[in-house]
C-alpha cells in the first residue's frame, strides 16, 4: 500500500537507461573486440536481450560490483550463431524489434517469441521495412510474434516511418549496417536518437539532417566503453512525486539528459513546476547531469502530438500531474500508447477515474480536469509504468493506493520502492 507521505528530499540516482543499455548490449555483441558497458540497467527487459545474445554465442562477463558493469565479447558484425531454440524477448518489444533487424542480416534461421503482452504488439511495423530491404521474415497473421527469420543479404532502402517510433527507426538503421550503400529513415517527428549516437561512437557513418537519418553499411563495428547514464524515464516517477508532494526538494544525479528524452521535464516546467536541470558531462555522445525538482503549485497545460515522442513513456505522469493542476490538461497524439506493454491510453483513464479523478479519454487524446484523487486499487496488468504510476499516486491520494502486480516495476526500475522509501525518510 502506498500512502500519503513525504516530502521527498535528498539526492538519489536511478538505474541505468533502458534504451541505451539495450542498444549497448546489441552493438557490443556485433563488435570485434570486447566492449565494457558501465552502469547498465539489469532488469527484465535487458536481461531478455542479454540472454538472447548469449544464446547466439555472445559472451557476457558480469562484474561483481554495485554498478554491475559487464564485459561483452561480441561475434563481429555477421558472426551471430543461430540458436538451438526460440529467442525469447519476454516483455521487451525493443529486444524483439532491434534483434530481428540484426538477425535479418546474419546467416541461418531465427525464431522470435515473447510473453502474452509482447505477442499482442505490432511487429508489422518492422516486418514491412525489413522485407523492403530483402529480409526473409514472416509473422503470425503477418503482424505479430512469433517471427521467423532466414538471415541473408540486405539491400539499402529509403524508408519513411508511418509511426513516430524510435524502435522502428533503430531497427531499420541496424539492418542498414548490413546493406551495401546508404539506408535512410525519414521521421516526421523526431524520436529518441540513442541508436544514431551510439553508432557514431562505434565508427559508423551516420548523417542526420531535416528529419532524415542516413547510415552507411560497414564491415566492422568498434565501440570503446559505453557509460550508461541513469534512465530519465525512471527518474520521471520521482520527479512527478516531488512535484506533487508539498515540501519536496529532490535531486536526481547522473541521469541521461539527451534532448530527445527531456520532454517530460519541459512539460513539468510549463505546468509551473519548480524544476531545473544541468548537463555536467557528455560521454559517448550522451549528455548527463542532475535534475532538481521542488514542489510548487501546478497549472494545466496542452501537450501536442509533436511533443509526444520525447515523453512517450511519461504520458501517464502528465495525467497524474493534471489531477492536481489548476485548469485542464489536454494531451494529443497519444494513440501509440495503445500498443505499449498494455493499452496504456485506456489504462490512464481507468486508473485516474478509478482513483476518483476526472479523465476523459478519446481515440488519440485525453483531457484531465483537476480533482484530487481519493485512492483505491491500481492493477498494473503487468505494465511496469502503470505499477509505478500507482505507487506515485498513492503518495498524494487521500486514502492511498494499493498496487496489484507491483513487481512489474522490475521490468525497467529494479529497486524502485527502495529508492522511493530512501527519499521519503
Ligand atoms: C524505446 C522506444 C519507445 C519507448 C520504449 C523504448 C526504444 O517505444 O516507448 O520504452 O528504446 O527505442 P516506441 O519506439 O515504440 O515508441
Image (tube, helix red, strand yellow):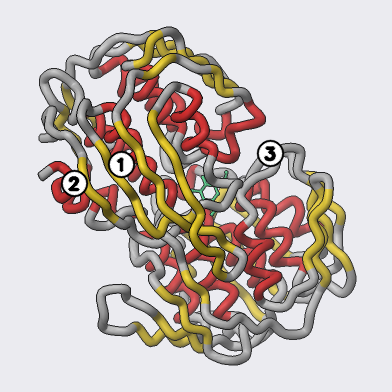
- Residue at image position (15%, 32%) is 402
| Within-10-Å neighbours for mark 2: few <14, some 14–19, many 20+ | many
Mark number displayed over residue 163: 3
**Cα distance in 3D space between marks 3 and 2:** 38 Å
Give the residue pinned by disc 1: 238
Q: Tags 1 and 3 in contact by the CB under 8 Å rule?
A: no
Secondary structure beneath label 2: helix
* Badge 3 residue CB within 8 Å of ligand 1: yes
Q: Is residue 61 above or below residue 12?
A: below
In the rendering, which numbered label is found on residue 423?
2
The image quarter in which residue 356 lies: top left
Give the number of marks: 3
Q: Residue furthest right?
A: 181
Q: Are marks 1 and 2 in contact (CB under 8 Å)?
A: yes
Asked if one can make out residue 82 in the rendered structure from this viewpoint, the answer is no
| Earlier sequence position, callout 1 versus callout 2 | 1
Point out the image quarter for the C terminus: top left
- Label whose residue precedes the other's in the sequence (3 or 2): 3
Counting residues from the N terminus, which is met first, the one under dot 1 or under dot 3? 3
Residue sitting at 59 percent across and 88 percent down?
75
Disc 1/disc 2 C-alpha distance (Å): 9 Å
Depth check, front residue: 128 or 292 = 292
Q: Residue at x 39, y 13 (%)?
A: 359
Q: Position of residue 55 (x, y in %)?
A: 46, 80
Callout 1: helix, strand or loop?
A: helix
Q: Quadrant of residue 403?
A: top left
Q: Residues within 10 Å of mark 3 (few under 14, many from 20)?
A: few
Amino acid at each position: 500500500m502506498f500512502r500519503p507521505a513525504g516530502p521527498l528530499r535528498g539526492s538519489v540516482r536511478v538505474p541505468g537507461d533502458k534504451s541505451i543499455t539495450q542498444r549497448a548490449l546489441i552493438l557490443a555483441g556485433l563488435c570485434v573486440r570486447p566492449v565494457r558497458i558501465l552502469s547498465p540497467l539489469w532488469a527484465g527487459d535487458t536481461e531478455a536481450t542479454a540472454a538472447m545474445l548469449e544464446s547466439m554465442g555472445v559472451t557476457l562477463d558480469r562484474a561483481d560490483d554495485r554498478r554491475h558493469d559487464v564485459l561483452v565479447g561480441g561475434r563481429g558484425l555477421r558472426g551471430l550463431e543461430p540458436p538451438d531454440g526460440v529467442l525469447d524477448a519476454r516483455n521487451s518489444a525493443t529486444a524483439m524489434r532491434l534483434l530481428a533487424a540484426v538477425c535479418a542480416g546474419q546467416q541461418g534461421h531465427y525464431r522470435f517469441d515473447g510473453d502474452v503482452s509482447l505477442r499482442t504488439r505490432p511487429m508489422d511495423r518492422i516486418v514491412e521495412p525489413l522485407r523492403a530491404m530483402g529480409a526473409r521474415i514472416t509473422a503470425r497473421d503477418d503482424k505479430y510474434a512469433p517471427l521467423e527469420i532466414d538471415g541473408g543479404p540486405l539491400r539499402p532502402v529509403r524508408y519513411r516511418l508511418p509511426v513516430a517510433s524510435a524502435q522502428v527507426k533503430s531497427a531499420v538503421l541496424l539492418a542498414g549496417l548490413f546493406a551495401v550503400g546508404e539506408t535512410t529513415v525519414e521521421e516526421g517527428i523526431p524520436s529518441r536518437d540513442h541508436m544514431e549516437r551510439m553508432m557514431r561512437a562505434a565508427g559508423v557513418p551516420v548523417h542526420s539532417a531535416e528529419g532524415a537519418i542516413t547510415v552507411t553499411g560497414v564491415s566492422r563495428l568498434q565501440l570503446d566503453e559505453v557509460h550508461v547514464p541513469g534512465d530519465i524515464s525512471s527518474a520521471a516517477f520521482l520527479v512527478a512525486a516531488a512535484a506533487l508532494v508539498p515540501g519536496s526538494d529532490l535531486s536526481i544525479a547522473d541521469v541521461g539528459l539527451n534532448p530527445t528524452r527531456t520532454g517530460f521535464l519541459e512539460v513539468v516546467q510549463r505546468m509551473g513546476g519548480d524544476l531545473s536541470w544541468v548537463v555536467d558531462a557528455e560521454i559517448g555522445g550522451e549528455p548527463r547531469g542532475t535534475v532538481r525538482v521542488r514542489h510548487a503549485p501546478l497549472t494545466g497545460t496542452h501537450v501536442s502530438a509533436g511533443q509526444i515522442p520525447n515523453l512517450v513513456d511519461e504520458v501517464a505522469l502528465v495525467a497524474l500531474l493534471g489531477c492536481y493542476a489548476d485548469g485542464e490538461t489536454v494531451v494529443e497524439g497519444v494513440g501509440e500508447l495503445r500498443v505499449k506493454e498494455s493499452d496504456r491510453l485506456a489504462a490512464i483513464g481507468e486508473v485516474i477515474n478509478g482513483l476518483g479523478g476526472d479523465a476523459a479519454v478519446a481515440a488519440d487524446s485525453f483531457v484531465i480536469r483537476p480533482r484530487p484523487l481519493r485512492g483505491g486499487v491500481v492493477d498494473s496488468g503487468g505494465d511496469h509504468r502503470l505499477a509505478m504510476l500507482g505507487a506515485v499516486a498513492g503518495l498524494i491520494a487521500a486514502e492511498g493506493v494499493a498496487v496489484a502486480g507491483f513487481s512489474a516495476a522490475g521490468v525497467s526500475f529494479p529497486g524502485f520502492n527502495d529508492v522511493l522509501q530512501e527519499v521519503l525518510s
